[in-house]
Image: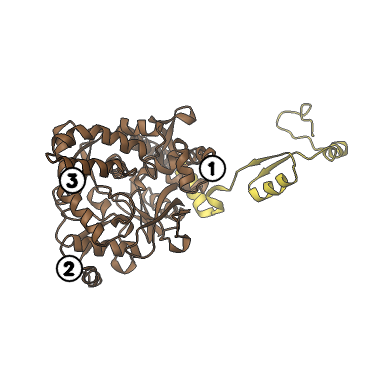
Chain colours: A brown, B yellow
Amino acid sequence: MSSSFLLGNTIRKANSEALKLMLGADPVLVDVVTASEAIPELEEGMILHSGPPIDWDRMCGPMRGAVAGIAVFEGWANDLSEAEHLAESGAFKLRPNHDFGAVGPMTGMTTLSQPVMVVKNRTNGNHAYCTINEGLGKVMRFGGNDASVIKRLCWLRDKLGPVMGAALRSGKGIELKPLVARGLTMGDEMHQRNLGCSSLLLRTLAPDLSRNVDDRDELSEMLAFIGSNDQFFLNVAMALGKSMMDPVCNIEGSSVVTAMSRNGTDFGIRVSGLGDEWFTSPVEMPEGLYFPGFSAEDANPDMGDSTIVETIGLGGFAMAASPAVAGFVGAGSPSSASDFTHIMGEITLTKNPEWTIPSLDYQGVPTGIDIRLVVETGIAPTINTGIAHCKPGIGQVGAGVVKAPLACFEKALRALAIRLGV
Amino acid sequence: MTKTSKNPKGETKVPDNNDIHTLLEGPPRVINIGLSSFADDLKKQDIEMVNLDWSPPARGNVELANLLSKLFYK
């Protein structure tokens, strides 16, 4: 029996195991707790960010703005200027969310006192975490850091987070797989369109929220906050994705991608058979549509851990479910949305029978990105994304589509070959 | 068009002069493989055409294509 045959068999078996773990995951939103409770390794001065590792010196504008803002929020600096000075001096420990079972959208700030949603993968028993979505406009995930941004973070910490936690603990948790399945039939792709799932989540959560808030005005404010944010579910979907993919890490020989993420400077991927190693390349600029008053000149390169949703077959991979988002992100006509999903089928190993798309005759979303298929075809994963302003403190300026850099996949392929003795 | 039905299995008939002449009769029918810009030009001229979206493995990178041939072994 040839060594090549044995090698092919090893990869095939490893990928089969990876797909079994992905498709067999049972993610449930079970709690909201402070990040320090969820992630014991967090300490004073430690800031988790999106994407692969990066130092202050190489951070882009919005990421720097968010680091300064979160330091003020945590009380580590009196103002933004002092925070930036501290960051420059190396006073903060900057680490990727992904190393701590967490994910965060855009800048992805996660620190001690922030509330994080907890998703438990009941099949494997692991947990994943993500902060609560702040809403639209000037927000920290897009680099916003003024008093209004900090005030909202305080409200999330002191009011909504604890109440959401109590509400979730009083029930059995919210099963997320069926929620996403319904969202796909309602026009969501779970990255740039979460209208259906956000509505379903609020509908499910509202009764238990109501039981945990005495003050009617406070309850009204919370319901309005969630109800007015079409993207509220994004952070839930991200924690769901992380809970699905973490058990897939470290399967010897597997060529399945377990994470795709960007920090505004670098794009990075992780591959099951290569453990926690990041394979990076300079991140690309999204192509998209801009809010009134902004243009491509204002845009920051691609950013955020939210690409975990593409890693599990949603977002750009599920574009066919969401013709409306194709127009929103400037990807073309609504009728062309299905083209994106078909093409992503060329670089994935299977289709998810539980997450189906009505307009494709209930075909499942393309699932299990194989680095071999990406390199062979030259087809880069399509990502739906928000676009941040390149300067700190301004926020979101548009939405668009971006391609994952092929160089990440080529580097990973070479590393996998070495790992397997080729 | 060439007629291959009379040829032994596995052999391709070399077109004779008559076949070549028939190729030049009537409008061209084209299969474009690879560069879509060629297909776009033909489309503009309303020429009947099928476009096959194809590129060499690993975008023509021989080193990566060799690795893939080993990692894809079935």
Name the chain under label 3.
A
Q: Which of the two discs, 2 and 3, labels the residue nearer the N terminus?
A: 2
Q: Residue at x 31, y 36 (%)?
A: A199
The residue under label 3 is A161
| Mark 1 residue element | loop
Mark 1 Cα shell of 10 Å, populated few (<14), some (14-19), many (≥20) = few
Q: Residue furthest left?
A: A214
Task: Using the image, determine if residue B10 lies above or below residue B35.
Answer: above
Disc 2 sits on a residue from what chain? Answer: A
Task: Measure how far apart labels 2 and 1 are at the Cα level.
Answer: 48 Å
Which of marks 3 and 1 precedes in the sequence?
3
Q: The disc numbered 1 marks a residue on which chain? A: A
- Residue A310 image label: none
| Label 2 sits on residue | A78
* Amino acid type, callout 1: Ser
Q: Amino acid at mark 2?
A: Asn
SS at circle 3: helix
Q: Whole-Å distance between the Cαs marked 2 and 3?
A: 24 Å
First in sequence: mark 2 vs mark 1? 2
Q: Tell me: residue A164, above or below residue A73.
A: above
Label 3: few (<14), some (14–19) or many (≥20) C-alpha neighbours in 10 Å: many
Give the residue at mark 1.
A333
Horizontal and vertical percent for residue A261?
A: 35, 52
| Amino acid bearing label 3 | Gly
Residue at 66% across, 50% down: B37
Q: Are marks 2 and 1 on the same chain?
A: yes
Across and down, in percent, residue A381 comes to 45, 47
In the drawing, does residue A330 fall left or right of residue A94?
A: right
